[in-house]
């Protein structure tokens, strides 16, 4: 799907080359590869007049000053792993790709912080830290995502039940806003009650308010030990009932994931790795961090007691690293495993944890009523359900119409349960209509006024997320 909008003649290319002198860092529109015009799924494609790769805050400052002067829209991207179309340029203009601003600038052990550029890849950052006995807890499924992208969507992941989400580890940000003003929010301090939290407006804003050029991130000491367990249940309801019991043991699990048997089979087929248990209708995966093996064993014993009281027929402790990693590989590949057998729409809704079973029952009912297959798994400890809605052999028009009907029904149900349409992927384009329908108009109006304060000409990622998609028109290019 291509998106229209004002397109510019490209006569500003000489000016861009004055801002960014290296020829390989300024790509004209007719030479931009498709992947830079899309997102991680590469099913929605936009258009742009130029693709630029800044390597410094000074270059970003000049780009946004020039964009403001000439009324040129800007779409930011980096790792390209976004799943909702946030990185698809809807109105032409510039794509600013941060993948070459990828340096780790500082590790400060005295304040337990790191200063990084937004294009640094998450798995690279975690690998460097762990070699030094340090730990960055946010752990979304896509490890090749960048830190700037994680911040732009407030990414969560499997360890959120214990450690929280990306927002909880952002101490400070350097941000460039339209016009080229460079702002610094927060710092290395643990507390901040000084005025409005502008930093937290940037986190999760999907590139609509400003462009992140530096991040100050909170670190922890690396846990000494880790281990886990798999519990098999006769039904998903029994497994979900066990979640609250496990949490109430105060054993402080690092992750609690749920999977149905059909999902496990997809993961096994995709990876070629065997799952350690069989025979259950549903499973819980648990992991624990601790200071000693004895400490973790005692907590796992309490978790087993809670799981069995909720109906677990099997409970297998996994202590050896090889088996532990294999289990989490199967869990971590599930979106790709589904994509390997069918095009699918990835959904990341979040509901109160006691409503997960109700929501999955609703999903199964929708499957029977619509004939559309849906695969569910997710973060049971925080109510974040990942759902793959599968296209299978439907024609494009049939798929578009049926997907919209199913998603509309599902999102209304989610809202009625006290949930939200996105837990960690963001809104972008693909979930925008459902988000706008299920969000109070007063909330949307306030968000749009905030957008106007940061970006009065509506140049940064126009038309996405909370914005009115009909209002993507821009001032005439200067």
Image (spheres, grey):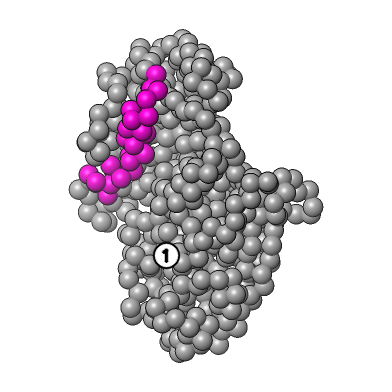
Local crowd size for mark 1, using a 10 Å CA cut-off: few (<14), some (14–19), many (≥20): many
Q: Residue at x 32, y 54 (%)?
A: 400
* Residue 200 location (% of width, % of height): 65, 52
* Residue 151 location (% of width, % of height): 55, 53
Which quadrant does the N terminus fall into? bottom left
Which quadrant does the C terminus fall into? bottom right
Q: Which residue is mark 1?
A: 88
**276 left or right, relative to 285:** left
Q: Which stretch did the figure color magenta?
A: 317-343
Q: Is residue 421 at all visible to an observer of this figure?
A: no
Instruction: Say what secondary structure mark 1 lies in.
Output: loop
Q: Can residue 415 be found in the magenta stretch?
A: no
Q: Is residue 282 at all visible to an observer of this figure?
A: yes
Q: Quadrant of residue 314?
A: top left
Q: Quadrant of residue 450?
A: bottom right
Q: Residue furthest front?
A: 132
Q: Residue at x 60, y 83 (%)?
A: 69
């Amino acid at each position: 799907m291509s998106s229209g909008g004002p397109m510019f003649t490209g006569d500003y290319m000489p000016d861009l080359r004055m801002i960014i002198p290296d020829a390989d860092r300024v790509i004209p529109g007719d030479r931009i590869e498709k992947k830079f015009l899309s997102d991680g799924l590469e099913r929605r494609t936009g258009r742009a007049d130029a693709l630029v790769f800044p390597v410094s805050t000074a270059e970003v400052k000049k780009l946004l000053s020039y964009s403001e002067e000439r009324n040129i829209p800007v779409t930011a991207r980096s790792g390209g792993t976004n799943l909702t179309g946030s990185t698809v340029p809807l109105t032409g203009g510039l794509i600013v790709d941060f993948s070459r601003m990828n340096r780790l600038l500082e590790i400060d052990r005295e304040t337990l912080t790191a200063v990084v550029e937004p294009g640094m890849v998450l798995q690279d950052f975690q690998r460097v830290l762990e070699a030094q006995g340090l730990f960055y807890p946010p752990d979304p499924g896509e490890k090749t995502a960048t830190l700037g992208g994680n911040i732009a969507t407030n990414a969560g992941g499997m360890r959120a039940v214990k450690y929280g989400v990306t927002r909880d580890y952002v101490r400070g940000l350097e941000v460039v806003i339209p016009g080229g003003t460079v702002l610094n929010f927060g710092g290395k301090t643990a507390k901040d009650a000084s005025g409005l939290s502008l930093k937290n407006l940037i986190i999760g804003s999907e590139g609509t308010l400003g462009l992140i050029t530096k991040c100050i991130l909170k670190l922890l000491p690396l846990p000494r030990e880790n281990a886990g367990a798999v519990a098999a249940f006769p039904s998903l309801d029994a497994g979900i009932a066990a979640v609250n019991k496990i949490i109430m043991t105060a054993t402080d699990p690092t992750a609690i994931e749920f999977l149905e048997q059909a999902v496990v089979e997809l993961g096994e087929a995709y990876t070629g790795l065997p799952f350690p248990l069989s025979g259950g209708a549903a499973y819980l995966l648990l992991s624990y961090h601790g200071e000693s093996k004895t400490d973790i064993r005692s907590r796992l014993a309490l978790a087993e007691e809670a799981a069995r009281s909720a109906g677990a027929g099997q409970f297998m402790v996994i202590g050896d690293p090889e088996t532990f990693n294999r289990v989490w590989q199967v869990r971590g590949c599930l979106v790709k495993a589904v994509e390997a057998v069918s095009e699918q729409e990835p959904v990341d809704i979040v509901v109160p944890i006691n409503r997960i079973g109700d929501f999955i029952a609703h999903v199964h009912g929708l499957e029977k009523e619509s004939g559309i297959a849906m695969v569910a798994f997710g973060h049971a400890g925080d109510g974040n359900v990942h759902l793959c809605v599968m296209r299978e052999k439907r024609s494009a028009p049939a798929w578009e119409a049926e997907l919209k009907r199913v998603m509309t029904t599902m999102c209304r149900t989610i809202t009625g349960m006290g949930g939200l349409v996105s837990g960690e992927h963001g809104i972008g384009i693909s979930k925008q209509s459902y988000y706008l329908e299920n969000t109070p108009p007063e909330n949307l109006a306030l968000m749009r006024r905030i957008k106007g304060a940061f970006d009065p000409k509506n140049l940064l990622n126009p038309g996405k997320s909370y914005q009115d998609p009909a209002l993507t028109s821009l001032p005439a290019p200067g």
